[in-house]
Image (cartoon, rainbow, N blue to C red):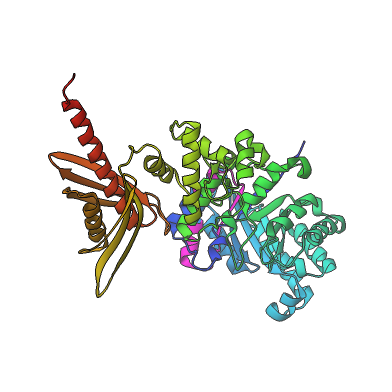
Amino acid sequence: MSENIIIFDTTLRDGEQSPGASMNLEEKIQVAQQLERMNVDVIEAGFAIASEGDFEAVRAVARKMKKASVASLCRANRKDIDRAWEALKEAKKPRIHTFLATSDIHVKLKLQKTHDQVRQAAVDAVRHAVGYIDDVEFSAEDAARSNVSYLCEVIEAVIEAGAKTVNIPDTVGYAIPDEFGALIATIRERVPNIDRAVLSVHCHNDLGLAVANSLAAIQAGARQVECTINGIGERAGNASLEEIVMGIRTRHDHLKVHTGIKTEEIYRASRLVSGITGILVQQNKAIVGANAFAHEAGIHQDGMLKDPTTYEIMTPESVGIKESSLVLGKHSGRHAFRKRLEDLGIELTDDEIQTAFVAFKNLADRKKTVYDEDIEALIAEEILRLPDRYKLVSVTFTSGTGVVPSATVEMEVEGKTLTRAEFGDGPVDAVFKAIKKICKSRAKLLRFTVSAITGGADALGGVTVRIKENGYTIIGQGASPDIIVASARAFINALNKLEYRKRNVMEEERPTL
């Protein structure tokens, strides 16, 4: 039977230390409730002595949590520990988390103490904390750069003093996975009372190895991992909770451990933390990024349509994402395009699909992503429209401050190519005047509406016009990334519909022989 890995989340403490990521009390409670909904084992709610706001946040979270342990960080001194206990004492499962640096760099340069003094201070802090509660955790700050023999001495001493969890931080993200795993293995071998405490790790991401180091530590015997939602934290951040949890779940065959995390709540937690902190999740972020379950390459899309396991090692539903997405772009293939048409309820013949696919590829060359709305507009433009008497060949225009707007329109009318240039109050007005002259139309423009069919700087623009002539009121539509071109298409579409209406009326009025 696989062993359980304790998930210690420090989003509210270490994660909040990301520049600009401060949360108010209500926001911290929101995040804490989501963490508990996910079944996080330990929630580090803050650094109680850091400020009055931190103290109140730790106390509020401690009061709210029903299942999760709630921890407060404190330095290895009585004042910090007393303050932490004051904030935690109403928690159902409180934990005091005290720390002290053990690396030569920190001992000599930051603390300016001897190694014996540091060891004794660590022991005294743990003993004082144990006077309040049994659940005490000790962290050896900068453990990854500490002398191994000295680190083992400190660990043995704090366990003897009553620490139930001993945390080995890679505080500056310096370790390499095999090196960090070996450190954990060495501690397990050389600390005689290590079986009396849970061995924990807390990895930073300065070299992009926080998750890899955490998993290496688990393989070497660590049974608690400290992490944050979206990997936020000091400098380059902490080990990402979602990556560790899904790494364990997806590669259970190799790691042979499990967590109690309700993974279907991961995406919700990611969105919540991102929204509150304002720290956006990069699109290619593992597990929760916008592209994590998105596929654009034609070969990948073809595989996904046949069997999702060809290109996905976990389901989007397993982390709380509704479904995978086949992103239609210039790399997409005919199979994915046909499937999207089916999903949209658009039925076309093989020849029509071929025509639409060519138009889709042309559009995809001009804009990165083609959305469903783009496709619907494209089908309406290229396939479903009536036989055209008037066809737009090209349109050019000039407009700007101090320039009289003008437009030159080239059209095909019943097999003949005609060109006309006109001035107008604006480029659209000039285009419409040129079109009317070419088509010899007296149509009056009643309404002109522009809308962005899709978002972004490369949005496909949609134009709807309403015209009237000889008692007929006609609506025309056009779409293009260029709004002036879309306007020309919409106006010409309306004129073609008008011609179709006129011809039908003439047929109906023709006497029957």
How far across and how far down the image is residue 246, in percent? 65, 45
The reply to whether residue 60 is in sight is no
Q: Residue furthest front?
A: 513
How far across and how far down the image is residue 492, in percent? 28, 48
Q: Is residue 304 above or below residue 8?
A: above
The reply to whether residue 149 is in sight is yes
Is residue 35 rendered magenta in the image?
yes
Q: Which corner quadrant holds the C terminus?
A: top left
Q: Nearer the viewer, residue 174 or 341?
A: 341
Q: Residue at x 47, y 52 (%)?
A: 29
How far across and how far down the image is residue 311, in percent? 66, 42
Q: Which corner quadrant holds the N terminus?
A: top right
Q: Residue furthest top?
A: 513
User: In this image, 172 relative to 406: left or right?
Assistant: right
Q: Nearer the viewer, residue 149 or 480?
A: 480
Q: How many marks?
A: 0
User: In this image, 118 relative to 274: left or right?
Assistant: right
User: In this image, 221 relative to 316: left or right?
Assistant: right
Q: Residue at x 62, y 39 (%)?
A: 302
| Residue 402 occupies quadrant | bottom left
Is residue 407 rendered magenta in the image?
no
Q: Residue at x 21, y 45 (%)?
A: 466
- The magenta-colored residue range is 33-58
How far across and how far down the image is residue 511, in percent? 16, 23
Q: Nearer the viewer, residue 32 or 438?
A: 438
Q: Nearer the viewer, residue 342 or 397?
A: 397
